[in-house]
Amino acid sequence: MASNANERFRTRAAAHGLQIVMSEFPAGTRTAADAADAIGCDVAQIVKSLVFVADRVPVLCLTSGANRVDEAKLAMALGTSRVAKADADQVRAATGYAIGGTPPFGHDTPITTVCDRDLTGFEEVWAAAGTPNTVFPLSPSVLLAITTALVADISA
Ligand code: 5CA
C-alpha cells in the first residue's frame, strides 16, 4: 500500500506534469544495488538522490548508482569551498523524505541540484519515489527538465 510519502511525491510530480508509474518491492530498494536487483536494471541506471551541505546550504546530488561523489568536484561545480554529506536529520529537514526514499524532486522546499553527467547517457533511469521500497522510471531529459539540475562530472 502506498504511504503518505509516496502520495506526497506523486502529487508533486503531477504538478510538474509527470504521471509517476511506481513500482513497489517489499524486499526493499533502499540502496542503489537493492534497487537494481529488484528492477533488473544496470546499477548505473539508478539515480541516487544524495544530500550534501555546502556552506551550510543543502544541495542535492543526483548520482549514478555506479558512481561515488567526489566532494571536491562537487564543491567546484557549486563554486563553494567545501561540501559535506548530510546526516539523516539534515536529509529529512531539507527534503521532507527519509534516506533511502528521497526522490530527485518534489521536496518540501526547492533545493539546488547537480546531476552526474553519467546519468544522461541512458534512455531510462530509475529513482526513489518517496520511500525505501518504491521506485519509478523516467528519462534523463525529463529528470533534467524538472530539476533544472546543473549537469557536471562529479564522480570520483
Ligand atoms: N532508494 C535508493 C535507490 S533509488 C536510494 O535512495 N539510494 S540513495 O543512494 O539515494 O540513498 C541511500 C544513500 O543514503 C546511501 O548511499 C548513503 O550514501 C546514504 N546514507 C545511508 N545512511 C546514511 C546515514 N546514516 N547518514 C547519511 N547518509 C546515509
Image (spheres, rainbow, N blue to C red):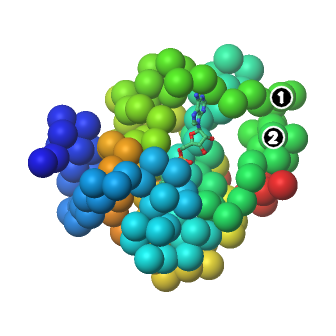
Q: Amino acid at mark 2?
A: Glu
Q: Quadrant of residue 76?
A: top right
In the image shown, does 143 or 96 lie closer to the viewer? 96
Q: In the image, ligand 1 is in what quadrant?
A: top right
Residue depicted at 75% across the width and 49% down the height = 69
Callout 1: CB less than 8 Å from ligand 1: no
Q: Residue furthest front?
A: 27
Instruction: Name the side, left or right, on which 98 lies relative to 5.
Output: right
Return the x and y of residue 73 as percentages of the image width and height: 84, 47
Could you say which disc has been placed on residue 82 in the image? Answer: 1
Q: Is residue 58 above or below residue 115?
A: above
Return the x and y of residue 19 as percentages of the image width and height: 21, 63
Q: Which residue is mark 2?
A: 71
Instruction: Name the quarter where the C terminus is drawn.
Output: bottom right
What secondary structure is found at the residue carrying circle 1? loop
In the image shown, does 129 or 142 lie closer to the viewer? 129
Q: Amino acid at mark 1?
A: Arg
Instruction: Name the side, left or right, on which 103 lies relative to 56.
Output: left
Return the x and y of residue 125 as percentages of the image width and height: 47, 70
Marks 1 and 2: in contact by CB < 8 Å?
yes
| Observer able to see residue 134 | no
Q: Residue furthest left?
A: 1
Instruction: Name the side, left or right, on which 106 lies relative to 116.
Output: left
